[in-house]
Image: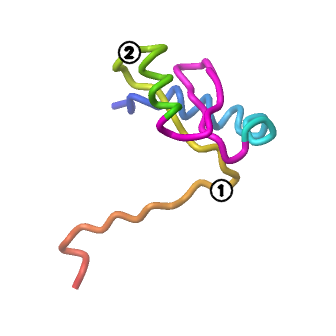
Amino acid sequence: MANALDREWTTYLAHKQDLLKRGRGRFVLIKGDRIVDFYDTQRDAVYAGYEHFGYVPFLAHRVVEDEPIHRIFHLTDVR
């Protein structure tokens, strides 16, 4: 089953080098294949997404060189 943001993430990765040149450290708003704009805060990007598209999935993501790794542990893994 496809994730609701697969298309947006694919767009982000396909344009990442250009996005880094144009908006490193800022938040980019992406809907489908469309790169909407850059914003200084995640809050601004999310509000703009709601304004443009309503309450549907869209990507508001900080443009960074190296994506952070998040580790999620199940309680049975911790001893």
Amino acid type at circle 2 is: Gly
Give the residue displayed 72% in from the left and 45% down from the top: 24
Amino acid type at circle 1 is: Asp
Instruction: Relative to 73, say whether 10 is above or below.
Output: above
Does residue 29 belong to the magenta stretch?
yes
Q: Dividing the picture into quarters, in which one does residue 79 lie?
A: bottom left
Indicate which label's residue lies in the foreground, 1 or 2.
2
Q: Which residue is mark 1?
A: 66
Q: How many marks?
A: 2
Q: Is residue 40 left or right of residue 77?
A: right
Q: Which residue is mark 2?
A: 54
Q: Which residues are magenta?
A: 24-43
Give the residue displayed 34% in from the left and 63% down from the top: 72
Indicate which disc, 1 or 2, sits on the residue closer to the N terminus. Answer: 2
Give the residue displayed 59% in from the left and 44% down from the top: 62
Q: CA distance from mark 1 to mark 2?
A: 30 Å
Q: Secondary structure at mark 2?
A: loop
Does residue 16 belong to the magenta stretch?
no
Relative to the observer, which residue lies in front, 49 or 77? 49
Give the residue displayed 45% in from the left and 16% down from the top: 51
Q: Is residue 3 left or right of residue 20?
A: left
Instruction: Relative to 9, say whether 73 is above or below.
Output: below
Q: Is residue 19 left or right of residue 30?
A: right
Q: Residue furthest right?
A: 21
Relative to the observer, which residue lies in front, 25 or 16? 25
Task: Bin the neighbour count of mark 1 within 10 Å (Cα to Cα): few under 14, some 14-19, many 20 and up.
Answer: few
Q: Dividing the picture into quarters, in which one does residue 11 lie?
A: top right
Quadrant including the N terminus: top left
Q: Secondary structure at mark 1?
A: loop
